[in-house]
Amino acid sequence: MTTNVTSLEQDFLDYVKKISHYNEAVGLMAWDLRTGAPSKGASQRSEVLGSLSSEIFRMSTSTEMKNFLTALRKDSEWGKLGDITKATVEECEKQLKKFENIPPAEYKEYVILTSKAEKAWESAKNQGDFKSFQPYLEKIVAYNRKYVEWVGYEGNKYNALLDDYEPGLTVDVIDEVFGKLKEALVPLVKEVTEAADQPETSFLFKDFPAGKQEALSREILENMQYDFDAGRLDTTVHPFAIGLNPGDVRVTTKYDEKDFRTAVFGTIHEGGHALYEQNVDEKYVGTPLCTGTSMGIHESQSLFWENFVGRHHSFWEKYYDLLKKYSEGQFDEIDLETFYRGINVAGPSLIRIEADEMTYSLHIIVRYELEKALINGELEVQDLPQAWNDKMEEMLGVRPSHDGEGVLQDVHWPSGAFGYFPSYALGYVYAAQLKQAMLRDLPNYDSLLQQGELAPIKEWFTEHVHQFGKSKKPLDILHDSTGEGVNPNHLISYLRDKYRKVYRLD
Amino acid sequence: MTTNVTSLEQDFLDYVKKISHYNEAVGLMAWDLRTGAPSKGASQRSEVLGSLSSEIFRMSTSTEMKNFLTALRKDSEWGKLGDITKATVEECEKQLKKFENIPPAEYKEYVILTSKAEKAWESAKNQGDFKSFQPYLEKIVAYNRKYVEWVGYEGNKYNALLDDYEPGLTVDVIDEVFGKLKEALVPLVKEVTEAADQPETSFLFKDFPAGKQEALSREILENMQYDFDAGRLDTTVHPFAIGLNPGDVRVTTKYDEKDFRTAVFGTIHEGGHALYEQNVDEKYVGTPLCTGTSMGIHESQSLFWENFVGRHHSFWEKYYDLLKKYSEGQFDEIDLETFYRGINVAGPSLIRIEADEMTYSLHIIVRYELEKALINGELEVQDLPQAWNDKMEEMLGVRPSHDGEGVLQDVHWPSGAFGYFPSYALGYVYAAQLKQAMLRDLPNYDSLLQQGELAPIKEWFTEHVHQFGKSKKPLDILHDSTGEGVNPNHLISYLRDKYRKVYRLD
């Protein structure tokens, strides 16, 4: 606890607070664009986003920022700083080092480009029309190729992008982890696909009104300890959660009236992200530390809730009745066992966000390999749809019939988030590791789910993950909670055990 | 059409465009705070608003801005400027002259204060608890008393505030116009109150589900030519419309399930504001001219649609069937004449936004006289509830039973908008003048309403009012459309004629 804050330290904290304010404004505008902003205002809104983002960029790389960092690093100052200030200095140094080599005009243009590209992508996706989106993606890839040169890298060019989402990880590590996953999962997928006793699923696809799905989603979020006084739930095309500050963390979802799973599991997933952002310690507000530490750790939270809670047998021993209450009789004839097997149906499919746990990582590996090739100049955008389709066939044995269900399905590339995808599979790996660690403190995990007592799970995560925000590095969080580095074996065992049971292979 | 824009002119236009971008971000955050932002994020959001508003303030008063204005005013430059640039220079000069004397720290503090005050006011209003809100209002009034000194005034101190909302008007003119209104309306109210044949109203207060009111509101807005691709409709506590840019103009409303009039007339009212903002010429985007020219002209639009359209007999000859379609049988036994008289019931009441056309201006005059006294130091905030109640009794013959239906009812003072209220009554006066002018071009006005042909009305306003944005001064718009200055006689004749008929006094 530093009570004597020097005026230099205070000026620096005020300066970074202003940056955090601009980030909150940008976050709200992004949320608004994706939830209900009128189409005719979108182009002007892109300009506004461009202005604010370039101001954030300017402030993060300004002479003033450089002077702050130099002055605070002096021996005479450093020892007097509070821990939060020290961690903030480190984060700002990292940003600065990264950004000072990016030409500001190109950065601003890129922000405007990606905002417009998202709108163009929506209609391209709906029409399965890659050609109309191709010019946007070419510019985005061209920027990212320049970006890795600007910011620098060791080893593979792609490492420069990984560092934005999963600092500490490299292509070498990921190639090894993903290699093990592929080696284990491709045969498991084959075994499951060929299993004689396939789950019944026809009961899943019945009319379930959107309004009732929304009420159900809200009740589950509340049970997960999501705080509606510090958030809200809206609909969107491609669901996401966004933390503006710990008191304002928004979840979005979508309702498919012919498949309740989209909303139920989607909302639980985004709720997992939201719990992370709502429970970062308030002391980090106004600093760049006030958010999740990496995309991978973030995904460990959402995937944990979606699968280790939401698709767990014990969870439905409690919540099946609630689901029945909101539905219109579609489960009347379906016993719990049939239901459980039905929602855990697994096998090759085209759409990542609708993929099951077992194949999900393979969808990610497809994207990772394509991104790596694009960034290293081994693949061009015009050849991407073909490469996508070929890789899907090779890895999962299925081929899209049009690009809307293929290469155009995700928002990540339109929004410029190259390097993000690996975090999803890493998040799975982390989640399985965290589950093992949690069992040491909560050996009654299954019976907590059976009773619908979800608070201890949320509290365990707040203690080991949420509270630290970005003040603790991803691999430190992993190591301090689990005693291990990145280890895919827990996920592999979990998936083998679960799916061999679901498919009655033993 | 200036095709050769000098680089000085271009730099200046880029600079003001950036200010307009920040204003759009502030506008979106304000909309969000009032429509659905979670309560726990509100305090942090106030800080963000404070940061952005003070940046707008800084940019509007910076040395850079001063240098632009000086350089552009040089004889060698001025002649080369486009008309939009010239009008933008004039608007910026006005802002600068006003703001350069306001201490930036006090301004920033005030923005944060009013944002917090709005939240405090909501609960104070709900609980009728003036004491909990008093400390906020004292600070707001104290700031406004300092403000009028900072920015300067001629004659009455209150003129400094009027200039923010209704440039060109002064206390002298308003005292005269409001004096005539009072002289005419107080006896008319008395006559109507004592009329033997009072309208039947019990049919108004039946169950009308919010969802159906919303569908009806949307249909009416569409008929008014409100463009939903450039806007959206949401619910809020105190309805408003806000223009972020002409492609994004949002309407808010609220649904009282026991009184459909709140939503129907409220939505039409805000829709009138929104049509103005949606139809400002696109060429003004990115300049301070891209909005309504004054609050009074803005209110002329909303009040025109609400009353001269929405409460007109001919309008309901067309739309009564639509209302019946969405309602749950509440009008089955009610003929058009009874309905028309019912929705035009008039008489003394407590709540301004629910007041009828006849008494509305008197509600405004109460507020105007209190504001004038507060700013001139003739009244203190602690004495305001008493003064409010006394004046309501004197002017309208009614006295609030608690402050929630009295002095706390409006958002204007919590949000710091002193000087705004007179615009409402001036808007009425202008609306009646514009109606007279419109009849020269649309002599078939009544039959247009009877046919539900509302487009020509919107188009007349776009031609005479909307398109110019702030490039034309309020009194110039009034004069060019009507050939007159401010003249309350048209409103007085209209109200006398209408209410003597509704109350069958002839």
Image: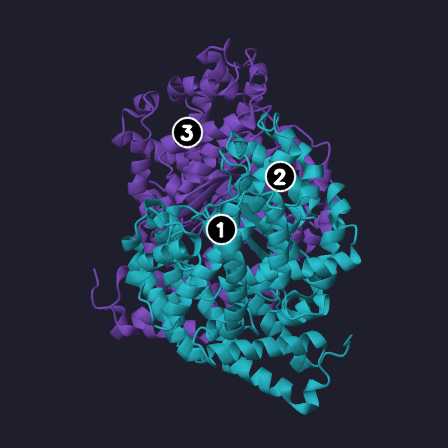
Chain colours: A purple, B cyan
Circle 3 sits on which residue?
Answer: A219
Instruction: Tell me the SS state at disc 2.
Output: helix
Which mark identifies residue B190?
A: 1
Seen in the picture, residue A5 relative to A254 is either above or below; the reply is below
Residue A212: x and y in percent read 51, 26
* Within-10-Å neighbours for mark 2: few <14, some 14–19, many 20+: many
Quadrant in which residue A147 is drawn: bottom right
Disc 1 to disc 2, C-alpha distance = 21 Å
Q: Do marks 1 and 3 share a subunit?
A: no
Question: Type of residue at label 1?
Answer: Lys
Residue lying furthest top = A333
Q: CA distance from mark 3 to mark 2?
A: 45 Å
Q: Nearer the viewer, residue A43 or A400?
A: A43
The dot on residue B443 is: none
Q: Residues within 10 Å of mark 1 (few under 14, many from 20)?
A: some
**Tag 2 residue:** B340
Chain under numbered label 3: A
Can the viewer see residue B259?
yes
Indicate the position of residue B211 as horizontal and vertical percent values.
55, 33
Question: What secondary structure is marked by label 3?
Answer: helix
Q: Residue at x 33, y 67 (%)?
A: B379
Percent x, y for residue B63?
A: 50, 83
